[in-house]
Amino acid sequence: MKSTSECRNMLSYSWGYLFYEDPPLSVDRAVEAINDSRFGKNIILVGDVVSVNFFRRGWGDIFVVDSKTRRNISIRQEDAYGTILKCKNPAGTISRECFEVFKTAFKLLEDKKTPIFVQVDGEEDLLSLVALYLCPAGASWIIYGHFKGFICAIPCTPYFKSVAKRLIEGCFEKR
């Protein structure tokens, strides 16, 4: 599915809880908010920089990375212990392959034995919508880095899942 030009502005909107501090303070504040919440404790990270910053602090269950960032920060393959899943996702799209990989990742998360790394060949930016759409309600948080430098933490609630569903259904053309 390819994003429509009408929706690109809408897709860049920040939602959820926003943390403006630099890491590691932003990571600590986000984890504190998660621990104090009733929305679950699983942490799904989308983006290389946010994944590295949480990984270094020992937090995170699913890490979605494409090994490309403006800051040249990524989790090295040798540091990524746990389950590694791979998918292709061209820029500005949500591929069926990545959609299926997320289904597998959430199924593996139920066992929660080791971290899960989703290595994206292409671009992972829009995959936070897929993560939010598929995450188990009341059990997880989706966290991604915003291009303006802060992090967004979205609890996986029925409301936010419905927003993700509406955006996926309304902002993408099936190919």
Image (spheres, rainbow, N blue to C red):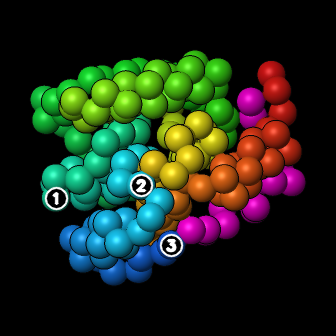
Provide residue 58's location: percent of width, then percent of height.
16, 53
From this viewpoint, is residue 148 visible? no
Gap between marks 2 and 3, in whole Å?
15 Å
Q: Is residue 102 magenta?
A: no
Provide residue 26's location: percent of width, then percent of height.
31, 74
Gap between marks 3 and 1, in whole Å?
20 Å
**Tag of residue 17:** 3
User: Which residues are the magenta region?
Assistant: 1-16
Of the numbered discs 2 and 1, the one sitting upstream in the chain is: 2
* Residue picked out by circle 1: 57
Q: Residue at x 13, y 35 (%)?
A: 79
Camera-nearest residue between 175 and 161 = 161
Q: Is residue 89 left or right of residue 164?
A: left
* Residue picked out by circle 2: 40
Residue type marked 2: Gly
From this viewpoint, is residue 5 visible? yes
Residue 111, picture quadrant = top left
